[in-house]
Each structure stands twice: as C-alpha cells, then as structure tokens.
Image (spheres, helix red, strand yellow):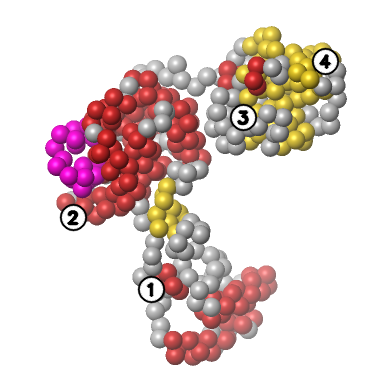
Amino acid sequence: MPSGNVPPPTQHPDEPEFVCIPVNREWIPILLGALQPLKYPEYWSGTLEENRGARKDFGLLLDQIMQAEECNMQKCCVEPTIIQRVNPDTGNVEISYDNGATFEPSPNTVQKLIVTPTPPVTSGISATKCDAAQNAQTQIEDWISHVESAFGVATSLVEFATAVASAILDAVLVILSAGELTAAQALIIPIIGAICAAVWTAGESLFTDYWTSENKKIIFCALYCHIGDDGTFNDTQFSAFWHEAQANLPVGIARELFLGFMSSVGRQGVNAMTSSGIAADSDCSDCCPSCSGLWDVYDETHGTITSRDDTQITVEATNPGGNYYVILHTPSADSCCIPLGYDVISGTVTQAGNLSWTTCGTTPVEGVPEHAFGLFGWDQEINYMQVQSDVPFTLQFNFAS
C-alpha cells in the first residue's frame, strides 16, 4: 500500500463532471475490497484537514459504487432517454435524464464549437461597446435575411430547418467542413425544430412582416443595454439580454425562432458576433433610458410625481384609502434597475424599515411586494418599490446618471 504519497483530489467524488467505467457486476465486491486502503490516513499526503477530507470522500465513493442509481450509472453505462428543453427563465439549453423531473445544462450543444475571441473593444476591433452591439445586430439581421431566403429554396420542412440551422452557424462565424457542419446542424435542429415547423407552416410573409425596423431596434437596444464595456457578454448579461428581448418583442412565432437561435448559440455565440468587426461610429443614444426614466406610479393612484430628471424622481404620497403611499414600478418584470436610495423631503415615513420591494424577474403585485419593509441594501435590481406612512410625506428617489 502506498504510504502517505497520494495527494487528495481537489474535487469530491459526487461532483460533476461524472464518468462511468463499465464493469461486470460480479466484480463490484472485488472493486470495493481493493479500495479499502483509501480509508486509512497513512494512504494520503496533504495537510491533516485534506487527509480527513479525502477519507470522508472515500465513504462517498463507496456509496456511489454500491448505489448505481445515486451515482447515475443508468445514464453513464446504459443508453439514456434524454429530454431537451430551453429553460424559460434563463434561455439556456438543458437536458433531463429522469423524464423531466430535473434538468441540468446540456453538455452537447453548438456552443462548445464556438471559440470566443478576444473582446472586441479590448482588441481594437470595435472602438466602443455600441460598435460591438452593432456587429452582433448585423449578424442577426443577416440571419433574418437567410431565413427569408430559405422559404424560396426549401422544398420541405427538413430542408427549411437545415437552412435555418446553417444560417445560425453562419451568424456565429463557425467555419466547419461538410461532415462537421452536418453534425453541428444536428445539435441545433432539436432545439428549434418545433418552432421551425410552425414558421414553415405559417409561411414567409408572416416571418418577413414581423421584422419591422421597430422590432429590429428592440433587439439592438437589448444588446447594447446589457453588453459589457469590453464588447462582450457574461452569463448574467446574456440572460438579461435574452429576457429583455423576450419581454419587449411582440409575441409571435418569429420571435420564438429568434429566441431559439439565441438559446442555441448562447453567450459564446453572441460574443463571436460582437467581434465580427463590421461596425464603426455606431449610434446607441436612443437606447437604455436612465434608471429614473423607467419608473412610474403604480396604477396612477399611489403617489404624484412632481419632478423628474436623469438622477432623481420626486414623489408626493397620496391617500387612496387608509394610509399614504408612494408606489413606483417599471414597465415589466424584467425591466429593472438599481435605485441609490431616497430622501424624505417633507412629512414622516413611519413604517418599520425603509422600503418594500420586488426583485427583478418577479411580477409585482400591488400592495403585496415580494419583500415587505426590510432594510433594503440599495444594491440590487428591482422592478417595484413601496413606501407608506399614516401621515403625508414626499420622497426624492435617487439614481445613477
């Protein structure tokens, strides 16, 4: 037996990424016996804490081997039934091995084929993040044109879906050989297949008519308002972009096909598009209203806005029945920003705590905020805020410029 020279692994045996070694069932007891030296402290090197942790992990390893279901043997060694979906909250592609009871990120998507380039602003491809957003927008509009062209050449749904998948790969600058291209299309088509069928059935005019200049601008502004200063998206920024496009684009099958395009390529694909190096001196001045510009009085009865500029809103409380209220909300659950705080201009705020609020992504309900009268930290994105008192008062909410 090795004597104190085996370094403890840095990960626990029940953490992904999982692998499976097919082994005859009769060999399981022999394998368990052969592993017994791992329970002794003399086997391991490292600090005392690392040594103890390794021996504790040995128990986990035994449990995984003895309970095949718990260690996911059924999905490693037996051909599994896999369900794919686009997560409705994140836009990410996910898979399920248990008939939809639980989902996890899919490891087999076209995103793994995309090499994320150096951020365009950092590398000098784009001068500003606005140029980078325009780069991505140009690729998206080219994709729209390719899909429109597919109606004219495809003779079946399969040909149409293949053309749409090829247009997606073109947009994210994935250059593949013929065989690799077919494999990459096969990764995309299951994700967009159902909506492709609906678009194909509806016909070209419905898809083409959807893409007005206004709808294209919604995408462009969603890109710009969430892109990083270096011209790329991280996972959180990509999710915010996806949600804003979903929330602000009119409902329709063309929107769903676009969202499927974005889901299939993910953050990696959009970052490849931002680095395509086409745009210069782009204008994003009409996008991204200031944080203060997003807010309005809830139901027009819970306060009166007396002044507003890019950094503040002054609101006088009203009494719709009972107490005095100031309730402000944004246009939608996914339209959010971070207020910096408020000043009491007149009167007194008498409730415990300083604010009740609803966090970004949750649909607010009048009078029933998600978080009631807690000590709000002024460091999170929200879409609803409420202050009340039993006496009249006026507040000035403050925002970053």
Pointer 1: what residue? 78
Quadrant into which the C terminus falls: top right
**Picture coordinates of residue 24, whole percent (x, y):** 40, 86
Pointer 3: what residue? 383
Q: Compared to 101, does 394 lie above or below?
A: above
Pointer 4: what residue? 392
Camera-nearest residue between 303 and 374: 303
Q: Are marks 3 and 2 in contact (CB under 8 Å)?
A: no
In the image: residue 170, left or right of residue 394:
left
Please tell me which of labels 1 and 4 falls first in the chain: 1
Pointer 2: what residue? 179
- Marks 3 and 2, how far apart in space? 48 Å
Camera-nearest residue between 181 and 259: 259
Please tell me which of labels 2 and 4 falls first in the chain: 2
Is residue 101 visible in the rendered structure shown here?
yes
Please tell me which of labels 1 and 2 falls first in the chain: 1
Q: Amino acid at mark 2?
A: Gly
* Pointer 4 local density, CA inside 10 Å: few below 14, some 14–19, many at least 20: some
- Marks 3 and 1, how far apart in space? 47 Å
Principal SS element in the magenta part? helix
Q: Secondary structure at mark 3?
A: strand
* Pointer 2 local density, CA inside 10 Å: few below 14, some 14–19, many at least 20: few
Camera-nearest residue between 204 and 137: 204
Q: Quadrant of residue 258?
A: top left
* Magenta stretch, residue numbers: 146-164
Please tell me which of labels 3 and 2 falls first in the chain: 2
Is residue 379 visible in the rendered structure shown here?
no
Camera-nearest residue between 251 and 249: 251
Q: Residue at x 42, y 47 (%)?
A: 86
Please tell me which of labels 4 and 3 falls first in the chain: 3
